[in-house]
Image: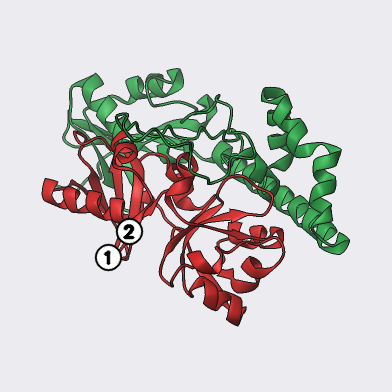
Chain colours: A red, B green
Amino acid sequence: MFKKFLPSTDVSGQTPLKSSVQRSIRAAVLSQWKIEPETLESIWPKKESLVHVKCKEHISIYTIHGEPLFFQHFDEPLYPTLRLLHKYPYILPMVKVDRGAIRFLLAGAHMMCPGFTSAGGYLPPANAALPAGTPVAIHAEGKEHAVGIGITKLGTEEMRKVNKGVGVEIATHLGDDLWALQKL
Amino acid sequence: MPHNKQPEPPSAGPQPQPQAPADAPPEPKPPVQVLYCEVCTFPPEYCEFGSSLTRCKEWLQEEHPDLFDKYYSDEALQAKVGTLSLEAQTKLEKDSMKKEAKAEAKADAAMKKKMSSHVTIKRIERNKRKYITAIHGLEAFDIDLKKAAKQFATKFATGSSVTKNAQGLDEIVVQGDVSDEVLEMIEGGVGVLKGVPEKNISVVEEKKKKGGE
């Protein structure tokens, strides 16, 4: 999503959001992520107004004081930025890829199923299976911090069964242009 | 960005932190402090996949020797090799070397280009006694044109703007003949105008053609 992203050409405008819209975003964040209202309050205090940065191809980034916090494509689920996820790693469910896949992930490739099902990978157990279309934090074998954020294309159980093709589509990863962008 | 803080201990993965007792007022959970490499901006454990591993290693050794031992000691390397076949490992190493060399060459080329690019200060005659000054080529030195224009405007108390010239390139146009002062400012590196070598600046004059209006 952010493989090529230049603020000078890809951002079409910044507007402070209406408070009613902010309220709905706050509700959406609380329902979609595993986050307590108090923690969200410390990330995004009620007094601070969220700024909506409109970008090409229906991508919206939400910032506070110029610092990107969430982004969204069209009206798909909200994703945290990778920096935010590093600070609060428990807000998204975790999947793990093996070491061989890191290289490709950092080049922006979508993650294939075998990377999760092999020895170094990790998928949540069957009783906590994730359906398709869930935002997930992608961790890597032997590393402690997340390397990317993506959305599941198959349910985790289905990934185990099919074990072929794209399992998780990457939204943002370490070293992409959103990562490089610390201030907007 | 929390740079100089220690990262969480390695065992603490994405597990929830200890819960506060239910009757206590709910406290926000503190964020995990993540250390980022100052060379490649990745968390140091991912430096090996970046394009500047040698410099990242140097930096980490200097700033955080304990972490350096953790990531690059023999044992750590051994553990890494254990999970991959030898062949894949050598290939990975080769790739990262190649990547590094490529990134270096790219940085060199960019630097060279920067050094060879020119800033021109052009004095353009508008009427017999009225001039404007156009400054072209500042963007090659990573100067924000809008900010620079604003600086000129406040300094000279005249109009100053960023416009596209005939070639479709951005330049700063300042009203009035301020070419000498602009030259001095760029040479002196005032405000945002930093990093332009003196010999790359030239001042030219453009007279209005006769027979025009």
Where's residue B145, x and y in %? 34, 37
Is label 1 in a helix, a strand or a loop?
Answer: loop
Q: Amino acid at mark 1?
A: Asp
Q: Would residue A114 be seen by someone viewing this image from the given angle?
A: yes
For the residue pair B116 and B150, the one nearer the viewer reads as: B150
Where's residue B123, x and y in %? 31, 33
Is A129 drawn above or below residue B203 in the view shown? below
Furthest-front residue in view?
B23
Is A114 drawn above or below residue B34 in the view shown? below
Position of A26 with respect to B42 (left or right) is left
Where's residue A7, x and y in %? 36, 50
Q: Could you classify mark 1 by the number of other residues whose Cα lies within 10 Å: few (under 14), some (14-19), or many (20 or more)?
A: few
Label 1 and label 2: CA atoms lie apart by 7 Å
What residue is shown with label 2? A72
Q: Amino acid at mark 2?
A: Gln
For the residue pair A119 and B167, the one nearer the viewer reads as: A119
Is B124 drawn above or below residue A62 in the view shown? above
Q: Could you classify mark 2 by the number of other residues whose Cα lies within 10 Å: few (under 14), some (14-19), or many (20 or more)?
A: some
Q: Would residue B165 be seen by someone viewing this image from the given angle?
A: no
Q: Quadrant of residue A133?
A: bottom left
Could you tell me which residue is drawn at 69 percent across and 49 percent down? A142
Q: Quadrant of residue A119?
A: bottom right
Q: Which mark is residue A75?
A: 1
Position of B109 with respect to A42 (left or right) is right
User: Could you tell me if the residues under marks 1 and 2 are in contact, i.e. CB atoms within 8 Å?
Assistant: yes
Furthest-bottom residue in view?
A162
Where's residue B37, x and y in %? 60, 35
Q: Which mark is residue B87?
A: none
Could you tell me which residue is drawn at 29 percent across and 42 percent down? A37
Which chain is mark 2 on? A
